[in-house]
């Protein structure tokens, strides 16, 4: 879709409390949420701001300040849905606007996208979505002349909803990503990945013990790896066992790297990029004596809060793992490294729009430095597990191949299917883990899939 910059009737970085959009005499219920959604969408797609940051920014200014919890949840749902199917939405609008979006039309592109996302993807009556978009256009100085166009285009989108959603040809993520995946995995797998990313994933949890029992109590299903996948959407903090610290939310694939450590009670394990602590919790729950390191004090504080809820005892260290020194080497080290996170686009569709191709090389350099430091902290005979939630081989397979070329004292310790509940198709020829978003299929799309993870287990040869 041809587009111009969003309307800037008032400064986008207006300070909190300062009204920046004039509401007009009669503001229909729900308009404020749509306006905030449109601005947050622009923050993500144009300024490459992660969605959480965009929402925090927008909830702190203008209309956002007055939104209650329900409206804020609605804003998040609208923007998330729009980002998940942005290619589909652009194509649907393009097909109904042969001349493209008029130039200098303010927030018009975002108004149309927010309207189309509600019509196509959310349980919101078409009429409400169209009317609010028209009101929104009327309230935006530059979009004002196009209010009738908004009405006509969105009505046509509503008329063709099923056909639009059945169309699977286009990309919903930026072209550079699909091109990359085609080159890495081949055309058929790249298509399957793109298909899986179109669906909102379900909620997976990791339990301390009695996974089958918790699957029953929480109305979930037990996955082969021992995770529980909830059958329905839920407000997790209100579910039984949450306040008592019996379980935590963690994608089934994200639970695999810590399982590969196979920690035994009393072993000393170092978790190098640990926050917010899903993997730390697994290690501690297995009885290991865990030291959790993270560079971010804020994220480490969240980890500590999580461990308190889970009643798990973990030592925390705020430090840059690249310069971590000292002490006795560890029985095992987990390095769940910072990465492009392209494997988590199902859960975080903003990642597709906030990451830039050039970031992959700089992240790979950081991972390589972290790996070298991690290796020095493993005792002879000890294990090193490296993982990333990236689909990019530079952050996975190629990273480990380069590491082994630099470190003759390490060798792969291949993963066996039994260790991960028999999900054999996620193990590559070198015994490494490579999960992809379309793995673990299910008839119900929301109950299918895994985040995309890479993990390799290495052992340090005995001297
Ligand atoms: C992928 S997240 C870790 C997720 C975590 N392992 C879990 O399972 O919850 C990567 C973490 O690495 C941290 N990080 C990034 N660079 C780091 C560095 N140089 N040293 C230590 N931690 C770092 C980030 O703050 C972030 O919390």
Image: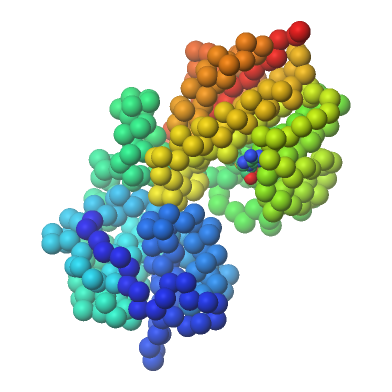
Quarter residue 118 falls in: bottom left
Q: How is the image coloured?
A: rainbow
Residue at x 70% of width, y 35% of height: 323
Using residue 118 as the reference point, say whether residue 239 is left or right of it. Answer: right
Q: Quadrant of ligand 1?
A: top right
**Of 229 and 66, which appears nearest the observer?**
66
Q: Quadrant of the C terminus?
A: top right
Residue at x 49% of width, y 48% of height: 348
Residue at x 68% of width, y 44% of height: 295
Tell me residue 282's x, y (percent). 73, 35
Residue furthest bottom as drawn: 25
Residue furthest left as drawn: 99
Q: Compared to 248, does 14 lie above or below?
A: below
Using residue 25 as the reference point, say whether residue 297 is left or right of it. Answer: right
Tell me residue 45's x, y (percent). 38, 56
Tell me residue 300's x, y (percent). 72, 48
For the image shown, how many numbered marks are present on the structure? 0
Q: Compared to 61, does 338 lie above or below?
A: above
**Of 10 and 231, which appears nearest the observer?**
10
- Res. 453 in view: no
Quarter residue 269 falls in: top right
- Res. 419 in view: yes
């Amino acid at each position: 879709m041809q587009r111009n910059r969003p309307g800037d009737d008032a400064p986008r970085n207006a300070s909190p409390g300062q009204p920046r959009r004039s509401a007009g005499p009669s503001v229909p219920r729900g308009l404020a949420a749509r306006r905030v959604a449109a601005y947050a969408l622009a923050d993500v797609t144009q300024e490459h701001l992660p969605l959480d940051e965009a929402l925090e920014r927008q909830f702190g200014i203008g209309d956002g300040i007055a939104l209650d919890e329900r409206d804020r949840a609605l804003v998040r749902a609208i923007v998330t849905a729009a980002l998940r199917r942005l290619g589909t939405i652009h194509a649907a609008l393009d097909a109904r606007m042969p001349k493209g979006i008029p130039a200098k039309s303010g927030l018009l592109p975002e108004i149309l996208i927010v309207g189309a996302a509600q019509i196509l993807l959310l349980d919101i009556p078409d009429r409400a979505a169209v009317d609010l978009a028209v009101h929104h256009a009327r309230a935006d100085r530059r979009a004002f002349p196009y209010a009738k166009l908004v009405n006509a285009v969105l009505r046509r989108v509503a008329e063709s909803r099923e056909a639009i959603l059945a169309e699977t040809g286009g990309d919903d993520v930026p072209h550079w990503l699909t091109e990359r995946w085609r080159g890495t995995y081949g055309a058929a797998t790249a298509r399957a990945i793109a298909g899986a990313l179109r669906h909102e994933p379900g909620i997976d949890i990791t339990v301390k013990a009695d996974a089958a029992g918790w699957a029953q109590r929480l109305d979930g299903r037990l996955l082969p790896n021992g995770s529980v996948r909830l059958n329905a959407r839920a407000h997790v903090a209100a579910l039984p066992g949450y306040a008592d610290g019996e379980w935590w939310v963690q994608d089934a694939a994200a639970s695999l790297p810590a399982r590969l450590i196979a920690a035994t009670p009393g072993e000393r394990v170092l978790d190098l990029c640990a926050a917010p602590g899903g993997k730390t919790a697994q290690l501690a729950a297995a009885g290991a004596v865990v030291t959790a390191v993270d560079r971010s004090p804020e994220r480490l504080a969240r980890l500590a809060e999580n461990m308190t809820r889970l009643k798990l005892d973990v030592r925390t260290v705020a430090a840059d793992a690249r310069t971590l020194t000292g002490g006795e080497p560890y029985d095992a080290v987990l390095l769940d490294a910072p990465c492009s996170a392209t494997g988590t686009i199902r859960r975080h569709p903003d990642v597709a729009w906030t990451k830039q191709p050039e970031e992959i090389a700089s992240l790979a350099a950081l991972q390589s430095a972290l790996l070298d430091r991690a290796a020095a902290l493993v005792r002879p005979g000890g294990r090193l597990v490296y993982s990333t939630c990236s689909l990019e081989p530079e952050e996975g397979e190629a990273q480990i191949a380069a590491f082994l070329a630099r470190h003759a004292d390490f060798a792969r310790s291949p993963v066996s299917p039994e260790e991960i509940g028999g999900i054999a198709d996620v193990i590559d020829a070198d015994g490494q883990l490579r999960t992809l978003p379309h793995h673990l299929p299910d008839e119900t799309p929301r109950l299918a899939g895994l985040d995309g993870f890479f993990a390799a287990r290495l052992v340090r040869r005995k001297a």
